[in-house]
Image (tube, helix red, strand yellow):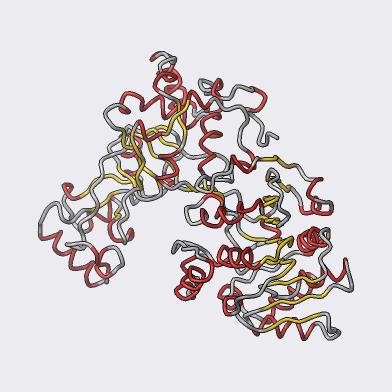
Amino acid sequence: MSIETVARYHRVVELSHRQKHGQFFTPPLVARFMCRWLLENGAKVLFDPAFGLGAFYFSVKGLEAEIRFSGVEKDPTVLAHFIEESPNLDDTFSVRNVDYFSIWGEQYPAIVCNPPYMRFQNFSERQYVFPEIEKRLGQKLSGYTNIASAFLLKSLHELAPKGRLAYLMPLEFLNTGYGEVVKRQLLEKGLLKALLRLEPEGEIFPDAITSVGIILVSDDGKHDPVKFCTVQTLEQLAGGVNELPCRDVPTEVLNPSDKWLRFFDEPCDIDYNALQPLSMYGSFSRGIATGANEYFLLSRSEALDWDLPEAALYPCISRSSQIKQSFIDDGDIERLIDNDERILLVDLSLIQTEAVSEYVDFGESAGFDKRYLTRMRKPWFKLESRQPSPILFGVFSRNGFKVIRNKSQAVSLTCFHCFYPNLFGSKFIDHLFLYFVSPVGQKIMSREVRKYGGKLDKFEPRDLNNSLVPTPEWFGKLSEDMVSKNVEMVAHSGKLSQIRLFDDLITNRKTLDASFCG
């Protein structure tokens, strides 16, 4: 399959059709690497459960002309395009126009696949696919499972003894709850041999916001350590797995319930004796979800136009971009209000006036009461109650996590997760904040992050609550004066890289600025 073939297909088939079928086509360098690995095992027949435009067919034929190739493809449009562009097919080729989940009971000695990619929300057939997987494989899937993971589970079940499998797919399942069942199956019988994280994901899935990787599986009966490899350029795939920069991780270290993305670049020599879960000090929860931000968030001028009483309004950070610095107080929030930012949250259940009634009527006439969240509330305009959080943690981030020490009375929408300390943790607010923004703290906490494409990181509240932070005894080594001076430095200069209070938590100092330790 050439780049020109994909370009012609894109010209004649609309984006909406490609998105509906989760079509992201495999680059030749990636396809050739995967096929070459399968052929190392002496494969004579390859099976592809999501044939598409035939990237793996052309790659393997270029490596071994006599190989037999079979597969299935659900979308008749893409299959017809392939056949039209490939007039010289012979009897070594066989692809059926059927749904992969409609055929069961077969086994294959070599499986290669780039499965459809779509979020679980768009995986409309999961209501019949998941029960079928549970019945035939004995695996109950979470409703959040994406179609690529369902493909992989089925293929693992269909891999013949001593066979090999190579899958190109999103790696987000390595750090999610729904991925636990997938990881458990990969570890069974020592099947999993290598996981490759492809850094240039934009060259592979340019339209998908997701991490991308290659999964290599072999039913060879050996329980070897699993290789976690980071591929910086596609040209690195010209060689074999053993030529890539990899870490060998023993299978006994790989717990299916843990997050695995950290094994690609986890800092070395972490002093685990000095760390404990954050939950000892309190917990993060998401910010306020209004269900209709355009209605519940107002600027000062908009509030005045409606003559809404101040008692119904309170300051609320509505976008991460509103906060540029790592330390905020009421003066910073007041400046945003004076700049007429939409930073006033209106809770119409707090007070009843004629102006409030008029604004409620306006909301109902505009249909805001029929939104998904609002229609669940009684009354529909009553918002979640939140206290200002002393530490705000950005949900999404790139190149470092965004952490705010909040000394203001502002609450936050879902752009930030909000830390609420328990009675014990309230003594360590500044300690925790400094740890969160320090280079060492961010490295250690990255073990729990969910990684997506384009270097996009995401935390859920549970991820943060499970993250490792210093013990009270370790924090006790820091004098109050030392903590105060560092907080002041952040507040006035924002020089987060200069916070070196936590360097001893990584005992090998050379790794502090390293992204990969092997």
Residue at image coords 70%, 50%: 194
In the picture, measured across the screen, residue 402 lies left or right of residue 352, that is: right
The answer to whether residue 196 is visible is no
Q: Is residue 492 left or right of residue 452?
A: left
Q: What residue is shown at x 81% (from left), y 59% (from top)?
A: 41
Q: Is residue 318 visible?
A: yes
User: In the visual, does 321 lie left or right of 409?
Assistant: right
Tell me if residue 298 comes above or below residue 118 in the rendering. Answer: above
Give the total number of marks visible in the rendering. 0
Q: Which part of the image, by quadrant, shows the C terminus?
A: top right
Depth check: 3 or 242 in front?
242
User: To which quarter of the image does residue 492 belong?
Assistant: top left
Looking at the rendered image, the quarter that the N terminus falls into is bottom right
Return the x and y of residue 157 as percentages of the image width and height: 61, 65
Residue 473 image-quadrant placement:
top left
Give the farthest residue toward the left.
353
The answer to whether 127 is drawn above or below residue 200 in the figure is below
Residue 119 shown left or right of residue 63 in the figure: left
Query: Along the line of sight, which residue is nearer the eye, 309 or 82?
Result: 82
Image height of 77 relative to 503, above or below = below
Quarter-of-image position of residue 446: top right
- Point out residue 495 in the picture as x, y percentages from the top left corner: 53, 27
What residue appears at the point 67 percent right and 57 percent down from the top-left corner? 202
In the foreground, 346 or 242: 242
Front position in the image: 262 or 491:
262
